[in-house]
Amino acid sequence: MSKNTQATFYFIVEPSRQIKRVFDGLHAFAVLACFLNSLQFVNQLIMAVMVTAFWLFGTFSRKTASVYLSYTVNKGWEVALDGYNYRSAMVLGTTVIASSAIFLHFKMDGQSSRSLLIARDSMRASDYRRLMVRLKLSGYSQGR
């Protein structure tokens, strides 16, 4: 049986609910900390309003579009941040693969490097495992 080295692997990275929960939880703890300090109530209220404003800004300005990844032996890695236009990407050696998340560090066509946090719930379990294997086989990971 011969290996198919021309196969193309496609991965769709959806927005993660786990990351959103962590983001929301950290902001809730920050608001709680605003009221548990020993400042005057007016100052506590101002700090809590500021933290809440930053939380709202982060929630509504966060991009929720899916990111599409593709890998072929000949072309290497390609990334479509908008979902349509695949652009060549060089996965950097600082990419970290863990069982709960992948910190994908890549550089696209003359741009500065970018990071993509891929939580386990961002894609189907089988796709997550395939992505981990592809990254490890292509030699771009620092396994932790």
Image (spheres, helix red, strand yellow):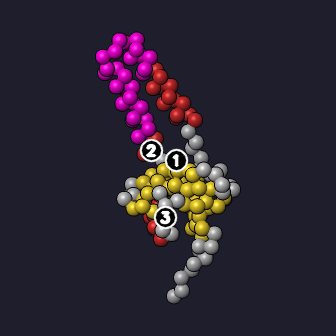
- Is residue 137 shown above or below 94? below
Horizontal and vertical percent for residue 10?
A: 58, 64
Could you tell me which secondary element the residue under label 3 belongs to? loop
Left or right of 73 in this view: 18: left
Question: Considering only vertical position in the picture, is 126 above or below 83?
Answer: below
Residue 12 seen: no
> Is 43 included in the stretch rendered in magenta?
yes
- Asked if the residue at tag 2 contacts the one at tag 1, i.e. Cβ–Cβ closer than 8 Å, the answer is yes
Please rate how many residues cluster around mark 1, counting C-alpha atoms within 10 Å: few if below 14, some from 14 to 19, many from 20: many
The image shows residue 99, relative to residue 30, as above or below, that is below
In the picture of the structure, the residue carrying the numbered disc 3 is: 140
**Identity of the residue drawn at 60% across and 70% down:** 72
Q: CA distance from mark 1 to mark 2?
A: 8 Å
Magenta stretch containing residue 77, yes or no?
no
Q: CA distance from mark 3 to mark 1?
A: 23 Å
Count the numbered circles shown.
3
**Element carrying mark 2:** helix
Nearest to the eye among marks 3 and 1: give it: 3
Asked if labels 3 and 2 touch by Cβ distance under 8 angstroms, the answer is no
Callout 3 amino acid: Tyr
Q: Tell me, for residue 19, which label it has, or none.
A: 2
